[in-house]
Image (cartoon, coloured by chain):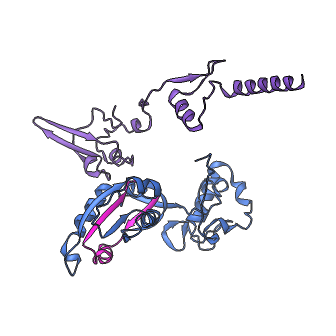
Amino acid sequence: MSYFVVNENCNGCLACVEKCPANALRFQDNGENRTILHNMARCVRCANCWRVCPQQAIEFQHFMENEWDEIISLGLVHCRVCGEPIYTADLQKTLTGKIGSEIEDLCPKHRELDFAARQALFLSRRTA
Amino acid sequence: MIVADLKPLGEIAESISPFQKVSIVACGGCVSVCLTGGTASADALARELSHPRQYKKRPPIFDTTTIQRQCEKDFVAAYLKIPDDADAILSMACGAGVQTLAETFGKVPILPALNTSFLGSLDEPGLWREKCQGCGSCVLAFTGGICPVTRCAKHLLNGPCGGSTNGKCEISQDVDCAWQLIIDRLKVLGRLGDYEKLFPIKDWSSDRGGGPRSMQFSSEET
């Protein structure tokens, strides 16, 4: 997906390429075609390209409103009582390794209820 | 954003003349937007500084690199790589970036290529104007969104001085009187009554008078 979008007014004049302070635009003349390329990692979003374009061809709104790119998808662990997603299985594994004991699959609310129930049971046994 | 000017070439050349290999490190943040940082400006500066006319002896050899934010120490330490044989670094960043490099590269001399000018905004293509002094105690809510601390030469908070003539400041006919702008704006907003309210004496301790300022988030916030 490209963030740098031009409309049909673009005539390949290269004003944007020449005025980009970040060298984030370049062009290639191959055979019959001129291709303009954009490098998002270099781009500082200064909008100089949009400002200098004599054709008003640059649709800069795509830099501000765009789709979300998926970075990674990881398996979830859900609360065993209510089914609310609580953390990823990988985070559970990391935390288990760090604290040295298993973490219960409970959301904060049910962890609290579970703790209160255990406490009540403990106290009732103690007083019995 | 922070606006900075390129120093005169002669001044830069003089500062780097004792060195054989100089790394030009441009910032890819604010100053690249005002065309004094960024990759294109760094390459152009390297070309200009490579000319022998700038030096009594041989010009240094240059390499150029750009890092997105030169003012973040951990980021710079992790991602900015300069050649091992670089004798000096010429920083194309604001003063915060230059000092971050100095703290990061302890044994390499860091030289500024820019004069950090002001906090400003782009009013027209190619024209930046100062709009904020970072005084630490913003009054814009009461002045129609126009800052008297920055835009009045005397930093007046309760109306114009006697030097305001036809909406211009006495220091120059090219400078608008900030208080004229404020009054005009308050009229448009239907809030001219605010002009009658007196500002109490401003506490300047949040400005530079209180020494270098800092801000720290708690570990939860960061």
Tell me where residue A78 appears, x and y as whole percent: 59, 21
Residue B57, quarter of picture: bottom left
Name which residue lies at 29% across and 51% down: A19
- Stretch of the chain drawn in magenta: B1-29
On screen, residue A59 above or below A48: above
Q: Nearer the viewer, residue B105 or B126?
A: B105
Tell me where residue A21 appears, x and y as whole percent: 32, 53
Residue B114, quarter of picture: bottom left
Q: In the image, which lettered chain appears purple?
A: A
Q: Does B24 appear in magenta?
A: yes
Residue B83, quarter of picture: bottom left
Name which residue lies at 46% across and 58% down: B73
Q: Nearer the viewer, residue A34 or A115?
A: A115
Q: Does residue B78 appear to the left or right of A22 in the view shown?
A: right
Tell me where residue B40 appears, x and y as whole percent: 28, 56
Q: In the image, which lettered chain appears blue?
A: B
